[in-house]
């Protein structure tokens, strides 16, 4: 049971879409990390006086990065499933 051209084309589009999602996720994660880190470095005097804000910012940063990594692994898993599907159908 082989793939027809339309099915291969649609799978390729879905694969490329997941690759785009991965790039967007990493861009957002790195940008957010740099933004919060920059804010912390610029406001070091205010943050050193109010330690609770510093702790809250660090916790927010950690949880957001965990969320981005989780979404990355989920999207990467979808991408690998499509890749395996294509490889399986090609080998038949």
Image (cartoon, rainbow, N blue to C red):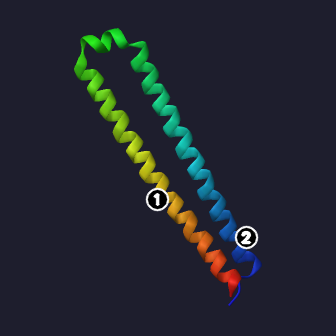
Which residue in the rendered view is the most extreme toward the bottom? 1
* Viewer-nearest residue: 64 or 44: 44
Which circle's residue, 2 or 1, is located before the other in the chain? Answer: 2
For the C terminus, give its image quadrant.
bottom right
Q: Can you give x and y, in whole percent of width and height, for residue 1 in the image?
A: 68, 90
Above or below for 29 versus 80: above
Q: Can you give x and y, in whole percent of width and height, for residue 76 in the image?
A: 53, 59
Element on which disc 1 rests = helix
47 to the left or right of 85 = left
Q: Which residue was labeled with disc 1?
A: 74
Q: Quadrant of residue 58?
A: top left
Query: Nearer the viewer's eye, disc 2 or disc 1?
Result: 1
Q: Estimate the spatial distance between the alpha carbons at disc 2 and disc 1, rounded to whole Å.
A: 23 Å
Above or below for 83 versus 75: below
Above or below for 92 versus 21: below
- Label 2 with label 1: CB-CB less than 8 Å: no
* Viewer-nearest residue: 39 or 6: 39
The local crowd at label 1, few if under 14, some if 14 to 19, many if 20 or more residues have their Cα within 10 Å, is few
Element on which disc 2 rests = helix
Q: Can you give x and y, in whole percent of width and height, for residue 68 in the image?
A: 44, 46
- Which residue is painted at 24% across and 15% down in the image? 50
- Which residue is painted at 69% across and 84% down in the image? 91
Q: Quadrant of residue 44?
A: top left
- Which residue is painted at 27% across and 26% down in the image? 55
How many marks overall?
Answer: 2
Q: Which residue was labeled with disc 2?
A: 9
Q: Quadrant of residue 19?
A: bottom right
Q: Which mark is residue 14?
A: none
The local crowd at label 2, few if under 14, some if 14 to 19, many if 20 or more residues have their Cα within 10 Å, is few
Which residue in the rendered view is the most extreme toward the right? 5
């Amino acid at each position: 049971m082989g793939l027809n051209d339309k099915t291969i084309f649609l799978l390729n589009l879905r694969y490329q879409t997941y690759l785009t999602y991965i790039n967007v996720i990493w861009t957002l994660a790195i940008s957010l990390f740099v933004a919060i880190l920059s804010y912390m470095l610029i406001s070091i005097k205010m943050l050193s006086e109010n330690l609770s804000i510093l702790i809250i910012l660090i916790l927010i940063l950690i949880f957001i990065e965990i969320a981005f990594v989780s979404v990355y692994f989920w999207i990467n898993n979808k991408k690998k499933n499509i890749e395996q599907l294509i490889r399986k159908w090609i080998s038949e």
